Image (spheres, rainbow, N blue to C red):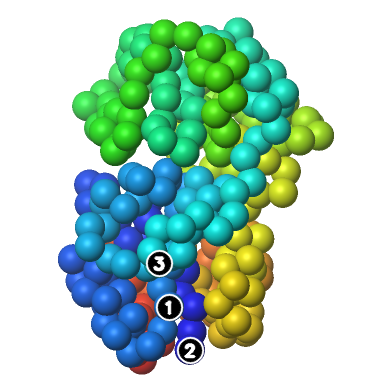
Amino acid sequence: MKLIAVDLDGTLLTSDSRPSSQGLDAISHAVSQGHTVTLCTGRASFDAKHLTGDLSIPIIASNGAEVFDREGKLLRETPIAPDAAAEAVRYLMKHNVYFEIFCPEAIYSPSDGEQKLLAEMDILVSANPSIDRDQLWESAKIQFVQFGFQGIDHPLQLLEQGRPVYKLLVYTFHEEKLNEITQHFNGQPQVHTTSSANHIVEIIAKETDKGSALRFLAGELGVEMSDTVVIGDSYNDVSMFKVAGTKIAMGNAVDEIKSLATVTTRTNNDHGVAYAIRTLLEI
């Protein structure tokens, strides 16, 4: 039996953020052949389930902070320590950027977040007239249509209620500010950062990443790491590419992922997951 971990954005999802129908069919086929397929994503678990519909498979969500079995039972969680989460939210509010708080039941974001992104985008476009404003905004709008997304007025009050925080996501068009935020959190003792796309930095607990979550799930299932397969495209997939037996990079993957890969498949818009499962893995 193989354990096949499939990323979502840039991998199973096409550029319009919808799952490849051929990819879903190939996953169902692999499961029918006795293999276990898990989604391994930076997205929240409920958002991943919403996108993939009727698939009854394990889910590794929030970049490894949540691990669920195929019945939806939570097997492990590694939230950010409450004091570190509160400090992080205060820091992000002070820096006046758009951010999201990933909790077990919802994704929360300050109610003025969209206006902040629009203002940043207008400054960027005015300084760089060649940039396609509409295309830029289309990439940002994905944040607001995540399943379970909710606007809130007082983020710190949310943390005071004691909810686990699996991840904080920052989206900014201000590259210097993005780099400053990344450096700040990589210097903190209880958290570190990763990224799944341009303009994004994601803050997670020090012990959290996709690779450690994959190791945990493989152990739960009794699967040797040599029998694990990963399919991904971006920087938050690096940790699972470093531990898996077979590593399949998407055709649209960043260079770092391709350099770690055993083999490269087609792009996400050309049903690369389906090609990887049916052709490269011969399942």
Residue at the disc numbered 2: 1
- What is the three-letter code of the residue carrying label 3? Arg
| Nearer mark to the viewer, of 1 and 3 | 3
Residue 28 appears in the rendering: yes
Q: Is residue 65 left or right of residue 277?
A: right
Which residue is at the front of the view, 133 or 4?
Answer: 4
Dot 1 falls on a residue whose secondary structure is strand
- What is the three-letter code of the residue carrying label 2? Met
Dot 3 falls on a residue whose secondary structure is loop
Rendered position, 236 above or below 88? below
| Residue at the (65%, 35%) spot, across then down | 80
**Upstream in the sequence, badge 2 or badge 3?**
2
Marks 1 and 3, how far apart at CA: 9 Å
Residue 254 appears in the rendering: no
Q: Which x, y percent locates residue 282?
A: 36, 91
Confirm or deny contact between disc 1 and disc 3 (CB under 8 A): yes
Which residue is at the front of the view, 149 or 115?
Answer: 149
| Residue at the (56%, 13%) spot, across then down | 156
| Quadrant in which the C terminus appears | bottom left
Q: Is residue 255 left or right of residue 43?
A: right
Confirm or deny contact between disc 2 and disc 1 (CB under 8 A): yes
Which residue is at the front of the view, 61 or 280?
Answer: 61
**Upstream in the sequence, badge 2 or badge 1?**
2
Q: Which x, y percent locates residue 246?
A: 55, 80
